Image (spheres, rainbow, N blue to C red):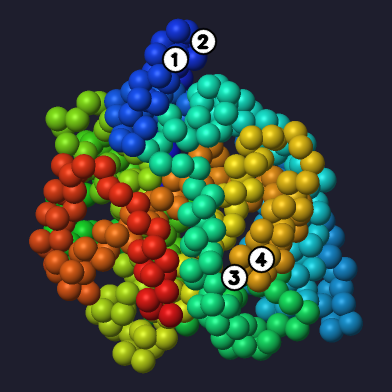
Amino acid sequence: MPDEGRGAEALLEASAALWDSAVLLELRASAQGNASAWSESKARLALTVDLQLRAALDPLDREASRLERGASFFMAGGENGLEGESISLAGALASIGVERNSERRRAIERERTRTAADIMGANRRAALLAEAEVLGDAGGGTIAGAISTLTSAADDGRDNCATLLGATDSQYREGLQRLTRDRLRGAGGGLTRSDVLPLFLRQPADRQFDGAMLDAAARRQARQVGLEPLLDQVRFDLDSRAGKRPRPATIPIDVPGEIMIVAWPMDGISGRRALWHEMGHALHLAAQPESLESILRRRPERAVAEGWAILFGSIPGEIPWLRAEGVSRADATAQSRDLAAADLFLARRYAARWPVELVMLADPGARGHGDDYAESLWSATGIEYSRDEALFDRDPGLAGIEYLRGWALAAGWAAELREQFNEDWYFNPAAGGWLMEAFWQPAPVVDWTRLAAALQERL
């Protein structure tokens, strides 16, 4: 995901003055007047909101990290001979990831969720209140107003989320049943969040992809799609070191000339997909035309930026790509189907979360958000999520709807690229030229029906 670059502190100081001035009202009015298109006024207001959110959330996020690092819980041993152990809250997800015993894995997840809610719940409630206040100010008092002024979405996305969930339900249930049978041997007692990793994220072909020389592999991919010159403006930070953030990020230091990708050198196909996703962000930033206003280069429309990232992140998982990497035809077909099931799970999870996030942002002090969250996630995914996760399982600001819109844009672009350059378009240098030309086209239309079809075509 994109992150702030050099000069953010100075911009933050300037935005603080803007926030309390009449200029904010003018920007908001201008942004509302360009509801269906990304514009300089929208970009300026969006960057101001980004920085206001950063000012409000950074201290809370630092406190949350401190609380998480200092907390732990004890897991007693069991009849199967497992010894008791103390597990740090910060390391609990890693413990869940390597735990092969399903009952033990679920027990760790229950304790992790309970401990996080006890230790960090008040902090996350404060973060939600701060977000709602900033977005409300930007939107003239409503979250709907914020969506109108800060995005080019036609509406708040709830109906589209319902359409996506309805259109993909049957195929998703079939895939979930197959993976539960094959990977969890039936999983008696129902599925919980602790089962997500073995169900969707561990992949049979992982052993064929190690984390070494990832930057070289990424550059080879950029060359194959005809965009390697743009990577001259991108630096890769893929070292393993203490204190490095665990989540991959793309940092726009000086767009379009200096961009950095920060990530761990992850093994497996998930490591390739995560790095290709960030490479999509970096290429999108590096491709910003110099003729654009600087504010539009620094703060492009987020749905479009996410669309580029999702488009590139989906390449490791396509059958021709897997075959080119030495995976057998049978294994590539099975692997592609499993990855498609994982993508559909993630899309349905986002589509289930976003309507709940809308309600949380509109009325952050109300009770019942946790129950709505757990019910919505269960209905969409067939996986049990704790009500206590509602405050933690969120993206900041309006990122939820922008990510879903980006997914829909990526599905449309992929369909057009396949039509122009065949199924293996990512091996055709002319495809890069097509993507570059997309910068000069009118704002793309989000086609949710095409997204639903794209999410199911490899299942």
Q: Amino acid at mark 1?
A: Leu
Q: Is residue 100 left or right of residue 297?
A: right
Q: CA distance from mark 2 to mark 3?
A: 45 Å
Determine the residue located farthest toward the top in the rendered image: 22
- Please tell me which of labels 2 and 3 falls first in the chain: 2
The residue identified by callout 3 is 197
Depth check, front residue: 220 or 132: 132
- Please tell me which of labels 4 and 2 falls first in the chain: 2
Q: Between tags 1 and 4, which lies in front? A: 4
Q: Between tags 3 and 4, which lies in front? A: 4
Q: Between tags 3 and 1, which lies in front? A: 1
Q: CA distance from mark 3 to mark 4?
A: 19 Å
| Residue 347 in view in this figure | no
Residue 431 position within the rendered picture, expressed as x and y whole percent measured from the top left: 15, 61
Q: Quadrant of residue 60?
A: top right
Q: Which mark is residue 24?
A: 1
Q: Between tags 4 and 2, which lies in front? A: 4
| Neighbours of disc 3 within 10 Å: few (<14), some (14-19), many (20+) | some
- Please tell me which of labels 3 and 1 falls first in the chain: 1
